[in-house]
Amino acid sequence: MQHALRLLLKTRMPAIYAAVLLLVTPLSSLTPVSHAQEQLNTGHIAVIMPLKSDSLGRQADAVRRGALQAAAANKEGPAVVVHATSDDLKDILATYNRAVQEGAQAVIGPLSRTAVNALARGGKIRIPTLALNAIDSEIVIPRQLYSFGLQIDSEAKQLARIAAKKGLRRALVVRADTPVSSRIVEAFKSEWSELGGTIVEQIPYASDSTQLIKLRDKTQAVQADLVLLALDSSRARTVRPYIGGAISVFATSLAYASNDPLENFDLEGVIFVDMPWLLIPDHPAVITYNQVAAFTTLEIQRFYALGIDAYRIAVELVRPALKIDDEPLDGVTGLVMRGQNQGFVRELTPAEFHNGVARVMADTVFR
């Protein structure tokens, strides 16, 4: 029976057959390129992911599965061919060139910022390529190289716009000694100043009670009307109880690391932004795709959603004209629009913690 079903899919619906077969193919059989992939040498989208990476393997596999799910749902769209790489830049560039030679219409990947920059600098981009990370600003971006990802910078800028729309003007920032925290602060500061806001003080994160009490007193002394927590969830949960309820508190999606109300209880009233995939289960785009119970963390679910929208954007890129230029893509990762420097940016869903539960705010779009 299974053999007959496979034969029917293979002969009558080859694109669906390949996408479905790849979706259930064990990760170990993806290297080298599987037999199902060898059958598709034209009319497909290549997904180049560091599936052999110790540091990014789980995220890469989530992207892979998301892209395959999107391809399976789009019965008339291009099939997906997965190429597994390591973190080695030579391996990634060689895999990219091989994917192009095998007839890919478009490429999704690489995933890491280092690999994306290497491709931008040295790769010969001959087909639409959707890199899943930001490209360094000093690099001259090849004409057919685009970027899309889960950049925290755009979240920080959206928080600034939300705060400005609420009539807030004086921000106190709590920051950690990490590169991610610095990126949040710099992006927020840039957008905030353009909107007429002022950062009255930046306070380094501390976990001891003496410093936290000083933070509480400082918040009152500087007369700020909002606090930005440029922190991860653990640090945000430590700081939040020392900030009074009379002041608005903002954070990025880093604060939303768990669905457990007990873990989120200390984040009461914190306003943050995140993707519809995690916040709006009845969103039209979210309903279309299967949520994967095997993904135990919200971080990995975000990469799964990234794979879904990456495939949908790649389908747009192979068309003569981009519909997304006229109307944003209502994606599972957010409202996707064209940004600067051939990038795609996301407008996320504003939410607020109430009794440990993330609740979508009534006005979900702040532009």
Image (tube, grey):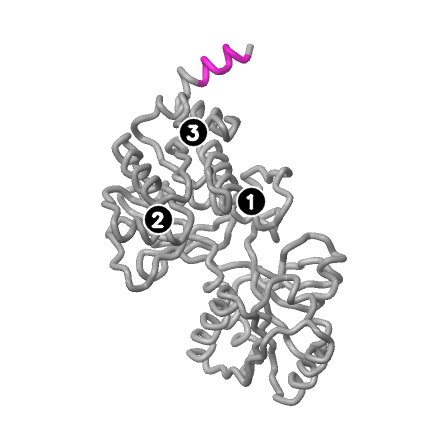
Tag of residue 286: 1
CB atoms of marks 2 and 3 within 8 Å: no
Q: What residue is at 55 percent from the left and 74 percent from the top?
A: 163
- Distance, label 2 to label 3, CA atoms, is 35 Å
Tag of residue 250: none
**Secondary structure that dominates the magenta span:** helix
Earlier residue among tags 3 and 1: 3
Question: Crowding at label 1, few (<14), some or many (≥20) Cα neighbours within 10 Å?
Answer: many
Q: Which residue is mark 2?
A: 323
Residue 8 among those drawn in magenta = yes
In the image, the segment drawn in magenta is 2-9
- Circle 3 — which element? loop
Q: What residue is at 35 percent from the left and 44 percent from the top?
A: 316
Residue 101 is situated, as x and y percent measured from the top left of the image, at 25, 32
- Circle 1 — which element? helix
**Which mark is in front, 3 or 1?**
3
Q: What residue is at 47 percent from the left and 50 percent from the top?
A: 330
Tag of residue 31: 3
Q: What residue is at 47 percent from the left and 34 percent from the top?
A: 68
- Distance, label 3 to label 1, CA atoms, is 31 Å
* Residue in the foreground of this view, choosing between 13 and 222: 222
- Residue 8 located left or right of residue 101: right
